[in-house]
Amino acid sequence: LNGTGVQTIELSDYIPITNNVRFRFECLLLQDKGGGCAVDEISLAAQIPTTITSCPFELNTSNEIYSVQNDIGPIAGTCLTISADNVTLNGDGHVITGDFISGADDFGVKFVEGVKGTLFNNLNVAGCSVGFGLVNNSGIGLNNLDAVSSSDSGLKIKKDSKFVSVEDGNFSMNVAGVLIEASSNVTINDSLIFGNSGVGLKFGENSSSNRFVNSIVSKNVGGGILFEKAHS
């Protein structure tokens, strides 16, 4: 560091940073000293994630980071409920296991209607009615997620949800793999939809501007990809 005034450096160049911690590092430089500096003040701010170890659990704080610490289940009913905007969840590869019994409110992860700006990473769900359920949600990122053995669907996106990005998903061995209903601007990329007993991927009525890219739909008993009327 050289010069005077407030300068910022990347702390990750000096200290290993995990996905679960965010750092800010600033120093106030008073004067040059042979190409270096005298440091008057150093501030270090870390956002430590809220940990999740059991269900049911509600993610209800906006702009918060959450981290699943262990496998959870078997459980009856919904495990994780997202009720706040702009949250991040890191599943760290853990598995949420349901009770393999169908129910009206039986989600691995349920988004409350209207929630927006959420990022989910690296989480697996098995044995729930719906693995991941969205209702009128927007700006949602779902990365590296698995939903298997769901009695309804692995992923259900409905009721005017929009701008949803699904990357590297696996929605296999469910009744339905992925259902998109009355929603738009949904992108599914680099994903696998395999071996579901019903339809693999359905674009329902009044859905539009959706994209399915670099993905595989195979060996789904009820058909691979279904387009209902009024889809564009």
Image: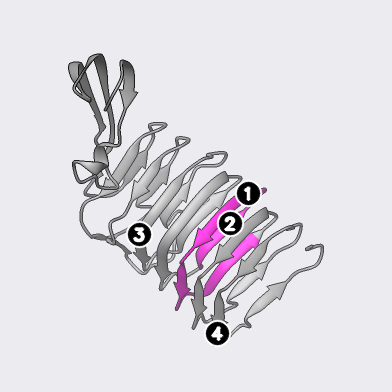
Kind of residue indicated by mark 3 = Leu
The image shows residue 175, relative to residue 209, as above or below, that is: below
Image marks 4 and 2: residues in contact by CB distance under 8 Å: no
Please state the horizontal and vertical placement of residue 166, each as a whole percent of the image.
52, 60
Residue farthest toward the front in the current orientation of the protein? 34
Image marks 1 and 2: residues in contact by CB distance under 8 Å: yes
Q: Label 4 vs label 2: CA separation?
A: 21 Å
Residue 123 in view in this figure: yes
Tag 1, which secondary structure?
loop
Q: What range is drawn magenta here?
A: 153-180
Residue 50 in view in this figure: no
The residue located at (28%, 49%) in the rendering is: 55
Q: Which residue is mark 4?
A: 218
Q: Label 2 vs label 3: CA separation?
A: 17 Å
* Mark sitting earlier along the chain (2/3): 3
Kind of residue indicated by mark 1 = Ser
Q: Which residue is mark 1?
A: 161
Using the rendered view, name the quadrant where residue 198 is placed: bottom right
120 relative to 180 in the view: left or right: left
Kind of residue indicated by mark 2 = Ile
Tag 2, which secondary structure?
strand
Q: Label 1 vs label 4: CA separation?
A: 26 Å
Q: Residues within 10 Å of mark 1 (few under 14, many from 20)?
A: many
